[in-house]
Amino acid sequence: MPSKGKVIVLRFSAMGDVAMVASVLREFSVQNPEVELVMVSRAAFKPFFDEIETLTFHAIEPKTTHKGVVGLYKLYRELRKYKPTAIADLHDNLRSRILSTFFRLATYKIERIDKGRAEKKALTRSKNKIFKSLKQTVERYADVFRVLGFNVKLSHQLVKSIKSIPANAEELFANKVAKRIGISPFAQHIYKVYPYNKMEKAIKELDSLGYGIFIFGGGNEEKAIAEGWKNQFKNVKNLIGKFTLREELDIISNLDVMLSMDSAGMHMASLMGVPVVSIWGPTHPYAGFLGYGQSLADCIQIDHPNRPNSIYGNKPCLCGVYPCIDLISPESIVNKLKERLTNG
């Protein structure tokens, strides 16, 4: 079993998946301190890996420098200069396969993630569904390193790491509040998003209880929604578009709990050791994407024989007239948060 080496790690997107990789590499680096890691991902995701001392971050620029097969070959030539001993493909998409092929032809050792596609298809199909908990994605990432010959045992524990509050965010923490709740109410796929009118009811109740509320994530459209909540409720802060990813992570580390969809917000909070109350619609934590170290008991979801019907949330709910996520009451969300904050 190798105790040294240099491993190039490939995972280009999406944000939540890359954050999960960071959680795995943190533990890997502690257990394998002599192994150098080269993380290849989008430049925007570099802050996820800032605290891993044995890791070098190498940005992929898929829309410019590394576009197409020619661009990927250029990336291969850049990465070859690190003189790696192995390549860990944690993505298994077209880009990572092409890049891995260049390394394979040069006789480098390659190992690729097993995404369990057949199991996931069985979990989400409408007929003859096999409803069981599948291997967690973080364990699938760790398996790649195990096959390469490295020891890695994941603790699946949250590790709280409170960071200094960024200077430009200190005013957000000026008011004394009972507890601080982060809310990441948006997601890439609309079918994973809890209805805004119901989320507003939950926010109204949390605000009346004296909790500080911090809204994260989204673009201009989501920013406008969050700004409306900020203007309506005295304890709500809108962070969208105001901070860098590094600053957002530092802010999250100072929160008591995060409320999130099945989205990147959950995985960012997990990386910072913050417990998450998560809301699930057509997707399900059984597919393996529950945040690292998070508890199934903190997942809010409706039991229905047609759930889940989607792995990524890009398909509408098949639960009947009303999507299953619509059947979750704002009161149940508030109660779960209060329970989580009370029990620590």
Image (cartoon, rainbow, N blue to C red):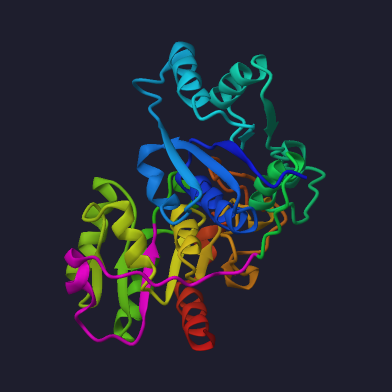
Kindly report the secondary structure that dominates the magenta region of the rendered protein: loop
In the foreground, 175 or 169: 169
In percent of width and height, residue 15 lies at 45, 45
Residue 169 appears in which quarter of the rendering? bottom left
Give the image location of residue 243, x and y in percent: 24, 55
Q: Nearer the viewer, residue 124 or 154?
A: 154
Horizontal arrangement in the rendering, residue 208 relative to residue 329 (left or right): left
Residue lying farthest top?
70
Viewer-proximal residue, 321 or 142? 142
64 vs 125: above or below:
above
127 up-or-down from 78: above or below: below
Asked whether 290 falls inside the magenta stretch, the response is: no
Residue 242: tell me if it is visible.
yes
**In the figure, 133 relative to 181: above or below?**
above
Q: Quadrant of residue 108 in the image? A: top right
Q: Is residue 126 among the parts visible in the rendering?
A: no
Position of residue 154 relative to residue 161, above or below, is above
Q: What stretch is highlighted in magenta?
A: 156-185
Q: Is residue 167 magenta?
A: yes
> Which quadrant: the N terminus?
top right
Q: Position of residue 267 (x, y in %)?
A: 49, 57
Residue 260 appears in which quarter of the rendering? bottom left
Residue 249: x %, y % from top left: 36, 60
Q: On the rendered structure, is 100 left or right of 168?
A: right
Q: Residue at x 77, y 53 (%)?
A: 131
